Amino acid sequence: MEIQYLDIKRKHLDTVVIVEVGYKYKFFGEDARTASKELGIVCIPGKFRYDEHPSEAHLDRFASASFPTHRLQVHVKRLIQANHKVGVVRQVETAALKAAGTNRNTPFVRKLTNLYTKGTYVDDIEGLETPTAGSGAGAQSTGYLLCITESNAKGWGTDEKVQVGLIAVQPATGDIIYDDFEDGFLRSEIETRLLHIAPAEFLVVGDLSKATDKLIQHLSASKTNVFGDRSRVERVEKPKTMAAQAYSHISNFYAGKMKSSQENDSDKQGAILDKVHQLSEHVTICLSAMITYLSEYGLEHVFDLTKYFQPFSARSYMLLNGNTLSSLEIYQNQTDFTSKGSLFWTMNRTKTRFGQRLLRKWVGRPLIDKSKLEERIAAVEELKEGENTIPVDKLKFMLGKIKTDLEKVLIRIYYKKCTRPELLAALQTLQEISGEYLSVKTPEESGFTSTLLSESVSNVPKIYDDLNSFLEKINARAAKDDDKYSFFREEHEAEDINDFKLSIASVEDDLNTHRKDAAAKLGKSKVDYVTVAGIEYLIEVKRKAPEEKKVPASWQQISATKTTLRFHTPEVKRMLQERDQYKESLAAACDKAYKDLLEDISSKYQQLRDCVSSLATLDALLSLAALANQPGYVKPTFTDDIELNITGGRHPMVEQLLLNNYVPNDLSLSHDSTRALLITGPNMGGKSSYVRSAALIAIMGQIGSYVPATNARLGMLDAVFTRMGAFDNMLKGESTFMVELNETSDILKSATPRSLIILDELGRGTSTFDGVAIAEAVLDYVIRDLQSLTLFITHYQHLAKLTTRFPAGELKNVHMRFEEQNGGKEVVFLYEATEGISHRSYGLNVARLARVPEKVIDVAEVKSADLEESMEVCKLGNLSRMMKGLLADGSEASLDKLVEGIAQL
């Protein structure tokens, strides 16, 4: 046993190995210490090392820890969540077959049968997910395993460019995303993709640049990271000839599948091979590494499913980069990094797990194709208007009855890992739902007018006949009880299963007949068998009874009490051994027949997946319709113009979390009139909430949702860029101001006239004069050259004069209203946006709200007044010098210069 274990462990030193020993699973050595720490189970002292170290020479056995067999999946998941790679070693030899073999005196044969990591765990339908639908649970990863590689493209330092390839696989659903792109010094493109995909595990191919490596470490190393949990990082080498090796490996992988596939599948495999050969070099390297990696876990078949093999950067979606996802709290809030308070939390009213996953994709990928957007929002409107009608209520009722994650069960069927109860539940659920819509033969018969709704509903009944053919083979009661021996109905049982059952019945009949012989030897009229402690066919003899002396010497005593002896006759022992062998063979035959059924169902995977995808679409649309039915939500109007006109707009998340009423505001931006708003106001006056609400309304509109406003007229935006908040990035060695300027630089390079730009207090990371200069130059460039729609928050009142440079009204001043009380010592925030400029920021009022000592505030007031007075003196001095120059010159040009100078003061 110890030799077996060491042989396996030395091949998997990076793995926590769990070994099946009888009715328990055990850990040995250092793994036992790890298990004790992570699982809270007792570690029995012993050797911890696997290398016969002299320091442990006095110990004769390994340290160990154990748990009952039925707790395996519970403990495996806990170890995976703690970022361990876990292997399960099972006995692959049964007691009955071993007893019949020639190696009966050797230890049971054990093999590593399963390997798990956070990104490859699919053995449990619940996976590693947290509760669904608006539970407010912590933000979770999506279960993606992401493979990444890069090479230096050009430049160095701040001009460095890298070429990045990635492929992300979600083994639990079969979805695959790939991309190849160039990224700059900030690695903002990589960050954007990582925040969208939110991987549970990284596979890094080759060495990464310092900036990329630090970004991955930052995003994956902390329990409070953007993914809601620590992500596992695995690294593999990248030889110089990796590209050629990868191409050859992928060709051989799919060529092998073409040879082994049936004729009708060979064309499909050929099409797959053609598709993967079109991938870029970097993506090909990632695909090869991913196939090798997933082969270790038996999940490489996921790459057969290229219908769900999609590029990340298909530009049919609005660009929401990493900064925007964080600043606007799209997936999680910035306070405790949970989903509660995020846009997704606000919009998520789905009833199914697979519907929730689809809605999450929609939230991160707003549409920029106007026809698709209008198709989606028309479906939402029809569901909203049809509230409490029979077709809509029927949809809600049917989706509400789905208690299993159909998308995950389908891929588990494809991997041959689905349990019998899961299979039955999935097939019966799909049969019931498709049966409800059996009368729908075409989209026109669906009961809906929207194209998206009618096509989704008409897809559902297409699988009904296939489902019936599968279910008629299954004994539902046995499947529900996970009874492999009676799983198939008798008429659909394989011939060998029936033969083994008949053989077992024959042996049991012989055992029953044998009672007469046993009774005759004991001199009794009859003998009944008893079962004690799971041991069957025992013959009981009372102590001191006459028959005790008649017990043959060949009978084996199995157990005894004070009054009773229990025996097995030689014939019983022989027949039990024979029966157990038949049972083991029957179990193997039943497992094979079940795998064959799963193979048959897998041949219909695409049709079944299309049905589930349609149900997910319906669930996501119903979620948006439920949101649309909230008070104060309105259907936006979409135009081809570049504009953002909102009346009575509200922040969708804040209004749900506030105890009192949210103050709505108007906002109007248009490429042909006012392109930018310069927003001032006191600290905590609602400036950030005002601009965020506008951006979120634009995003929600292009998701296909109703929006929290009285009226909304929206142009089709291609991106939302934000530069909000200030912080040092110590991992990159960047100061607050450096972070500000780098992010701003990226925005200026990427924005188009159809983008919305939000800049919050740009320039505050340096001296006032430099900050004002940079803020003014950036704002001028955005309005004049980029011509993007812009919301610019600032405390630099000097910037208000910029409106004079744009006589056509491209820039307007807006401030958040407030009222002074108690001689200016207190400020009442009205949270209303109105035209004009706020001349003070009232930072001292915030200090009072923060309960800074009054003595400190009194000194600050004096210093503030002194500074304001000195600034006024400077202004008067400048005015005096201008007047002297005018009196000395007296020309008309000097008079114009004076007027301009006074305006600037």
Image: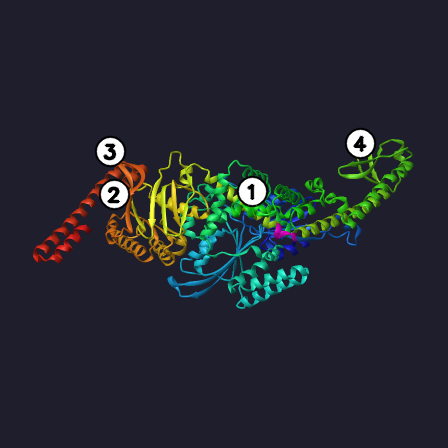
Going from N to C along the chain, the mark reached first, 2 or 1, is 1
| Distance Cα–Cα, label 1 vs label 3 | 64 Å
Q: Quadrant of residue 485?
A: top right
Q: In this orientation, which residue lies closer to the viewer: 647 or 342? A: 647
CB-based contact (under 8 Å), mark 2 and mark 3: no
Going from N to C along the chain, the mark reached first, 1 or 3, is 1
Please tell me the numbered disc located at residue 447: 1
- Mark 2 element type: loop
Q: Position of residue 166 (x, y in %)?
A: 51, 59
Residue 28 in magenta stretch: no
- Mark 1 element type: loop
The residue pinned by badge 3 equals: 822
Q: Residue at x 33, y 44 (%)?
A: 687
Please tell me the numbered disc located at residue 840: 2
Q: In this orientation, which residue lies closer to the viewer: 134 or 455? A: 455
Going from N to C along the chain, the mark reached first, 3 or 4, is 4
Q: Residue at x 65, y 59 (%)?
A: 265
* Number of the front mark, 4 or 2: 2
* Number of the front mark, 1 or 4: 1
